[in-house]
Image: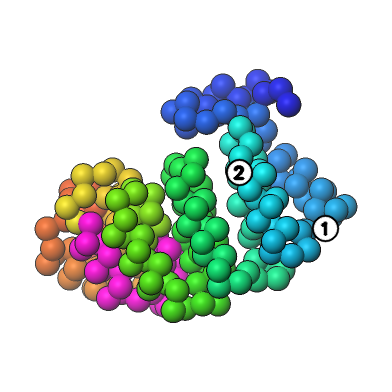
Amino acid sequence: MRPGPAAAAMERYMRDRFSFLGAKASHRREIQRRFWKREGLPATETMLVEVVTTLWDAPFRELHYAALETIECFQVAHGTSAGFIDVLDQLLVRHSWWDTVDVIAPRLAGLRHFPAYPDQAHSAAGRWIRDENVWRQRAALLFQLKWKEKTDPTLLFSLIERRSDSGEFFVQKAAGWALREYAKTDPDAVWEFVAGHDLPALTRKEALKHLSSA
């Protein structure tokens, strides 16, 4: 496969961390849709893991995106076993950057996996936030991003507190983003939490972005 003319711009946007083919997301997804319509999704979770591993080992970032979208299609169609959290965990820390972690944590784990295995949410988040890997920490902070009124605020706030002294941009940003999203459900709780804790300036700014004029 030869990279197209858009590849260089995509690579610059991602700070030259990954190689790209230069395929637009809409075009890539159309190719994927046609392929899975013709070939079908992996028949079993074992086959899914084999496909995802092959795509994840490929040198081009678009194939990593394809791996994540294949997982989500399989989750919607069939669900995944409790042990699939180990696969998601490994994807968090291989070829890691915000573009994949921000799909794995709130969507594949948060929306698809943890609702089926709710006890895992607390245990996985606890492991991730304690880990020294920044991307696992970010995942712990973001997995409830789309939960709205189902968010566990006690858990969310405790996870943020655990890493409130982090100097990592992606951790500070994730904490603020999580608070900002939860503020759409319970703005008073977020106000109270931010007011009562010594949070990094970036986290505070992100958390209060849409509350500052309230």
Q: The residue under label 1 is which amino acid type?
A: Gly
Give the residue at x 36% y 60%. 128
Q: Position of residue 147 (x, y in %)?
A: 45, 71
The stretch in magenta equals 141-163
* Residue 83 versus residue 65 in the image, above or below: below
Q: Is residue 35 left or right of residue 53?
A: right
The one nearer the camera, 124 or 11, is 124
The one nearer the camera, 180 or 43, is 43
Q: Position of residue 126 (x, y in %)?
A: 33, 67
Distance from disc 1 to disc 2, alpha carbons, whole Å, reads 19 Å
Give the residue at x 40% y 67%. 124
Q: Is residue 121 left or right of residue 200?
A: right
Q: Is residue 176 magenta?
A: no
Quarter-wise, where is residue 125 in the image?
bottom left
Determine which residue is flagged by label 2: 56
Give the residue at x 61% y 72%. 81
Q: The residue under label 2 is which amino acid type?
A: Trp
Q: Position of residue 80 (x, y in %)?
A: 63, 69
Residue 40 numbered tag: 1
Residue 70 in view in this figure: no
